[in-house]
Amino acid sequence: MAGFLDRAKEQAQRGITQGKHKIDEVQAQRAGGDLLKSLGAAYYAERHGTGSPDATQRALQALESHIATHGDGVLRS
């Protein structure tokens, strides 16, 4: 009986770990998507005279930093 409970506990722990990993992955993808949208908005504003090249550059750097940390999965649709 104790062996069964130990195996069940192990499986539950694995499930929890996998769930946490998936949540972290989804949060990173959402953050990357937000950064990509910010870059698009900054570029649009710059092209239409209401933004600045500095704002576009900051948005690009933030996105590149995120990609360096989490990979380029945010760029895939």
Image (cartoon, rainbow, N blue to C red):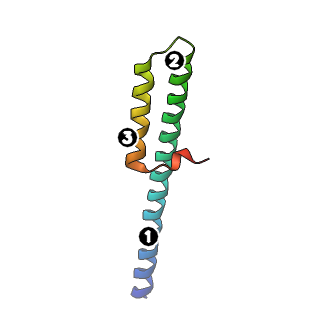
Please identify the residue farthest to the top as the structure is shown: 49
Q: Residues within 10 Å of mark 1 (few under 14, many from 20)?
A: few
* Labels 3, 2: front one: 2
Contact? badges 1 and 3 (CB < 8 Å) = no
Q: Secondary structure at mark 2?
A: helix
Q: Which residue is mark 1?
A: 14
x, y percentage for residue 39?
Answer: 50, 29
Residue at image location 39% in from the left, 33% down from the top:
61
Question: Which tag, 2 or 1, sits closer to the chain's start?
Answer: 1
Question: Alpha-carbon distance for marks 1 and 3?
Answer: 30 Å
Side (left or right) of 29 relative to 69: right
- What is the distance, in whole Å, between disc 2 and disc 1 at their CAs? 48 Å
Camera-nearest label, 2 or 1 = 2
Q: Residue type at mark 2?
A: Glu
N-terminal of the pair, mark 1 or mark 3, is 1
Do tag 3 and tag 2 residues touch (Cβ < 8 Å)? no
Q: State the residue position of label 2.
A: 46
**Could you tell me residue 26's position as x and y percent?**
51, 49
Q: Position of residue 20 (x, y in %)?
A: 44, 57
Disc 3 secondary structure class: helix
Q: Quadrant of the N terminus?
A: bottom left
Q: Check disc 3 and give the amino acid type.
A: Ser
Q: Say if mark 2 contacts mark 1, CB within 8 Å.
A: no
Amino acid type of the residue that numbered disc 1 sits on in the rendered structure: Arg
The residue that mark 3 highlights is: 65
Distance between mark 3 and mark 2 Cα atoms? 21 Å
22 vs 36, nearest the viewer: 36
Q: Earlier in the sequence, mark 3 or mark 2?
A: 2
Which residue is at 52% across, 42% downward? 30
